[in-house]
Image (cartoon, rainbow, N blue to C red):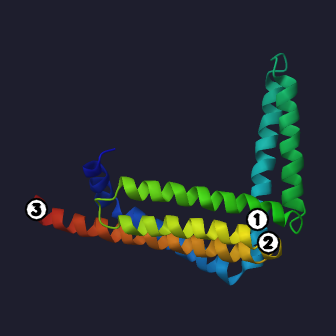
């Protein structure tokens, strides 16, 4: 998508960008207010996603039992079910592993947001995407450096901070889009 098309899309859909930003800020405030609960909730949710994925893999394997990959798909599905059950039903264990995964996720997210900021850089508000990317990388590095002691409380807090930065970046992008939209509306009349 070219710069002009991106700018037009943000201008046209600025309300959706604003709603996303507000939702992310609300989620961020909740995560900061209850960091241990947020950490455990993220772990439980991840567990349920693995459980659902594992159930789908096992179900699919039995839909095509003559397939040469049947046994492997069944084993992978069983592993997903075991890991998902562990994550979902033993929420206070494995927080260190979750911390490592989240650190890697935030660093990757930060890199992608910086790339996205570069790609929309002529558009107003691109700086906030860049700032959000830098913040995500910082959150990932802070999680990694604070291990193992920070795994129980810092994850929820840092997830909340990351959500706040992401939310504000979308709000500022939406406001820039609304400004462009407001300029275009009188020109169209």
Disc 3/disc 1 C-alpha distance (Å): 51 Å
Q: Which residue is mark 2?
A: 151
- Location of residue 101 in the rendering, given as x and y in whole percent from the top left corner: 73, 58
| Residue 23 in view, yes or no | no
Disc 2/disc 1 C-alpha distance (Å): 6 Å
Q: Answer few, some or many: residues within 10 Å of disc 1's Cα (few below 14, many 20 plus, some between 14 and 19).
A: many
Looking at the rendered structure, the secondary structure element under dot 1 is: helix
Q: Which residue is mark 3?
A: 187
Q: Horizontally, is 38 left or right of 126 in the view? A: right
Looking at the rendered structure, the secondary structure element under dot 2 is: helix
Q: Is residue 59 above or below residue 45?
A: above
**Earlier sequence position, callout 2 versus callout 3:** 2
**Earlier sequence position, callout 2 versus callout 1:** 1
Q: Which residue is mark 1?
A: 99
Q: Answer few, some or many: residues within 10 Å of disc 3's Cα (few below 14, many 20 plus, some between 14 and 19).
A: few
Disc 2 + disc 3, Cβ < 8 Å: no
Q: Horizontally, is 10 left or right of 68 in the view? A: left
**Earlier sequence position, callout 3 versus callout 1:** 1
**Residue shown at the point (85%, 58%) measured from the top left:** 87
**Residue shown at the point (51%, 73%) measured from the top left:** 165
Disc 2 + disc 1, Cβ < 8 Å: yes
């Amino acid at each position: 998508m070219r710069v002009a098309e991106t700018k037009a899309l943000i201008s046209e859909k600025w309300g959706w960008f604003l709603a996303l930003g507000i939702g992310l800020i609300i989620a961020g405030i909740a995560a900061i207010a209850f960091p241990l609960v947020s950490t455990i909730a993220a772990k439980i949710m991840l567990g349920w996603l693995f459980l659902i994925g594992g159930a789908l893999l096992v179900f699919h394997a039995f839909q095509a039992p003559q397939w040469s990959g049947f046994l492997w798909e069944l084993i992978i599905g069983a592993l997903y079910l075991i890991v998902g059950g562990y994550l979902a039903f033993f929420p206070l264990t494995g927080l260190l592993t979750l911390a490592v995964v989240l650190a890697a996720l935030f660093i990757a997210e930060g890199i992608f947001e910086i790339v996205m900021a570069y790609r929309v850089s002529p558009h107003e508000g691109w700086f906030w995407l860049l700032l959000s990317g830098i913040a995500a990388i910082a959150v990932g590095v802070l999680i990694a450096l604070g291990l193992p002691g920070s795994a129980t409380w810092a994850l929820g807090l840092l997830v909340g901070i990351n959500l706040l930065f992401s939310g504000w970046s979308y709000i500022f992008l939406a406001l820039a889009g609304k400004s462009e939209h407001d300029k275009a509306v009188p020109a169209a009349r």
